[in-house]
């Protein structure tokens, strides 16, 4: 018995199923799955620059006969949707399991989306565990099923499953040889002449899977009081068991395709039937489409965010328990860039320039929050570069504020590169800042092509960022230390004064990469309480509410010296 998170359990299940290869792009809440898999014996695992590449590598390995695990967060499925939809046509050779880790409640995501829609739309089956034991069991079983039905399988977790540790009865790794590969264009070359017959294969397979799912052991009915029947899956099942353990439950372990007949029979066997789900109407719509007439809740479930046990009680018109959490009593802890973060000064200077800043996704998205407040847009990974180009196009010919795109190194490798190719190709202008902190900081410091660190510490090559930019045809490329206020200010000023494309690489390692701490700073008697140092938003600097004077917490300060450069009175000194 081991105590595993859902992520660890999926990695373990895949490993025991003899999975040979893992590919992924990090993203919360999925990241630890591939990090765990990479540590297990006799496997190869790699970070890819994005999820499309990860799935394509996985499909290549599967075609060649290996069993493969590919992991990502929910928005990653958008990025790999193109290969996913056609992988449903080609099918697999070695079994393939794709983890989509959803984030209802958006603890660390830019949107709330339900990966089950992808399963339904691409006709790829999706499994849904409700604890780590099931995550392990389903991941392990998925490989044989993927090979039997000749289709990739998806497994959907949500943040509560991904990150909650529960006991798991683990087993042994099966020795599964890599299957032989034989050239078969009718299966693997998806052009119309071959895709049309494969489409017929897909249609037949869907019928076979619909039969399988009617009696599949991953779906089960737990009989209770038959006045209420609840259909559910995933983490929501646990909340139902907590809120109303007395009701009858149809717990789905496969949420596409659905067991239509079994669901109709269940609905017939109870007086009232409901679907409980969170942040989506996928399941209720799909259950209705099976011919089940769902009853109306007394109080509708929340249309967005996570569902909690008290929401379920309220929806059934049941009394709430006397002791409830009072979240209002918990002090807010808004996220902030770390003390010493090398992203800070760039935002401070962009705010001074009153630039329109098209942002991107990474730690540096925090530059949007007060007191830095220096970001106008954030859409998806890579959009900073392409949206900057769009702003420049729309504002061309008018007097306008400088347009600056800000993107991290990992995000630039993910999809910023192709956006920049577009800007160069179409003779776009504007300034792009690549905040190269030598890591993928936001998701826990994974390697990426621009620092050359690989998942299993294999030898690699660090891609030469300035050389790539020059080769792309960017005329103005500079590399600047983002901890040097004068250099940041001067380089940005020069770049925005030109009506041409400039790319500035701000290069300094993430402060969390270095364990060494420089001597800290303190505020001396020259302080005039002007508040400029506070406007950097460093968590180590605070203001006395009454006097307005500032102080620096030596525990938090790591001696980066950014604040000292902004103090006009010499009031910040190194200890
Ligand atoms: C399509 C997609 N995949 C993954 C993520 C998760 N994610 C958010 S930011 C980020 C990378 C951040 O690294 P970098 O651009 O180097 O910036 P840093 O955090 O180091 O400042 C990742 C992987 C996401 N938001 N969207």
Image (cartoon, rainbow, N blue to C red):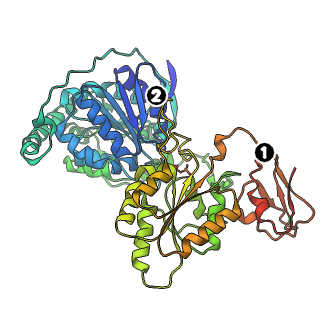
- Label 2 close to label 1 by CB (< 8 Å): no
Q: Residue at x 78, y 57 (%)?
A: 541
**374 to the left or right of 156:** right
Q: How many marks?
A: 2
- Asked whether 571 or 478 is in front, the reply is 478
Q: Residue at x 45, y 33 (%)?
A: 33
Local SS, label 1: loop
Label at residue 518: 1
Q: Is residue 479 above or below residue 454?
A: below
**331 to the left or right of 13:** right
Label at residue 38: 2
Counting residues from the start of the chain, the first of labels 2 and 1 encountered is: 2
Q: What is the x, y in percent for residue 319?
A: 51, 49
Disc number lying in front (2 or 1): 1
- Asked whether 39 or 573 is in front, the reply is 573
Q: Is residue 78 above or below residue 475?
A: above
Q: What is the x, y in percent for residue 42?
A: 41, 19
Disc 2/disc 1 C-alpha distance (Å) = 34 Å
Q: What is the x, y in percent for residue 360?
A: 49, 59
**CB at disc 2 and ligand 1 closer than 8 Å:** no
The crowding category of the residue bearing disc 2, from other C-alpha atoms within 10 Å (few below 14, some 14 to 19, many at least 20), is: many
Outermost residue toward the bottom?
398
């Amino acid at each position: 018995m081991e105590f595993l998170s859902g992520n660890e359990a999926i990695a373990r299940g895949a490993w025991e199923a003899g999975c040979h290869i893992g590919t992924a792009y990090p993203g919360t809440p999925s990241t630890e799955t591939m990090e765990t898999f990479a540590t297990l014996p006799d496997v190869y695992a790699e970070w890819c620059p994005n999820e499309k590449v990860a799935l394509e590598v996985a499909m290549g390995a599967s075609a060649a006969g290996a069993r493969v695990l590919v992991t990502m967060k929910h928005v990653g499925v958008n990025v790999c949707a193109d290969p996913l939809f056609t992988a449903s046509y080609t099918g697999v050779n070695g079994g393939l399991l794709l983890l989509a880790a959803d984030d209802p409640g958006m603890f660390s995501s830019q949107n709330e989306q339900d990966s089950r829609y992808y399963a339904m739309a691409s006709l790829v089956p999706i499994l849904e565990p409700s604890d780590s034991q099931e995550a392990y069991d389903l991941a392990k079983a998925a490989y044989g099923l993927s090979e039997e039905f000749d289709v990739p399988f998806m497994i959907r977790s949500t943040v509560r499953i991904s990150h909650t540790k529960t006991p798991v009865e683990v087993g042994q790794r099966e020795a599964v040889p890599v299957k032989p590969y034989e050239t078969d264009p009718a299966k693997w070359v998806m052009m119309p002449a071959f895709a049309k017959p494969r489409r017929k294969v897909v249609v037949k397979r869907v019928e076979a899977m619909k039969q399988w799912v009617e009696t599949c052991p991953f779906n089960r009915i737990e009989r209770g009081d038959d006045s209420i029947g609840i259909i559910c899956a995933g983490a929501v099942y646990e909340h139902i068991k907590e809120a109303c353990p007395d009701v009858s439950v149809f717990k789905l372990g496969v949420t596409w395709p659905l067991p239509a007949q079994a669901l109709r029979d269940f609905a017939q066997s109870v007086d009232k039937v409901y679907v409980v789900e969170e942040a989506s109407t996928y399941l209720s719509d799909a259950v209705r489409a099976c011919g089940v007439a769902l009853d109306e809740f007394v109080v509708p479930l929340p249309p967005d965010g996570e569902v909690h046990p008290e929401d379920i009680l309220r929806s059934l018109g049941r009394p709430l328990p006397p002791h409830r959490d009072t979240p209002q009593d918990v002090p807010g802890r808004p996220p902030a860039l770390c003390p010493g973060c090398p992203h800070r000064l760039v935002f401070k200077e962009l705010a001074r320039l009153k630039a329109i800043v098209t942002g991107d996704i990474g730690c540096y998205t925090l530059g949007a929050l007060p007191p830095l407040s220096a970001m106008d847009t954030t859409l998806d990974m890579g959009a900073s570069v392409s949206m900057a180009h769009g702003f420049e196009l729309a504002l061309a010919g008018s007097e306008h504020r400088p347009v600056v795109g800000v993107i991290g190194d990992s995000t630039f490798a993910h999809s910023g590169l192709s956006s920049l190719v577009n800007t160069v190709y179409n003779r776009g202008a504007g300034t792009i800042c690549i905040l190269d902190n030598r890591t993928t900081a936001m998701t826990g410091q994974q390697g990426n092509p621009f620092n050359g660190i690989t998942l299993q510490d294999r030898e690699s090559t660090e891609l030469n960022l300035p050389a790539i930019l020059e080769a792309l045809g960017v005329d103005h490329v500079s590399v600047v230390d983002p901890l040097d206020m004068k250099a940041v200010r001067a380089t940005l000023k020069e770049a925005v004064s030109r009506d041409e494309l400039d790319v500035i690489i701000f290069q300094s390692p993430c402060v969390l990469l270095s364990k060494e701490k420089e001597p800290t700073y303190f505020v001396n008697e020259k302080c005039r309480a002007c508040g400029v140092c506070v406007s950097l938003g460093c968590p180590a600097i605070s203001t006395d509410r009454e006097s307005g004077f500032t102080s620096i917490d030596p525990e938090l300060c790591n001696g980066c010296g950014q604040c000292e450069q902004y103090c006009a009175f010499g009031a910040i000194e190194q200890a």
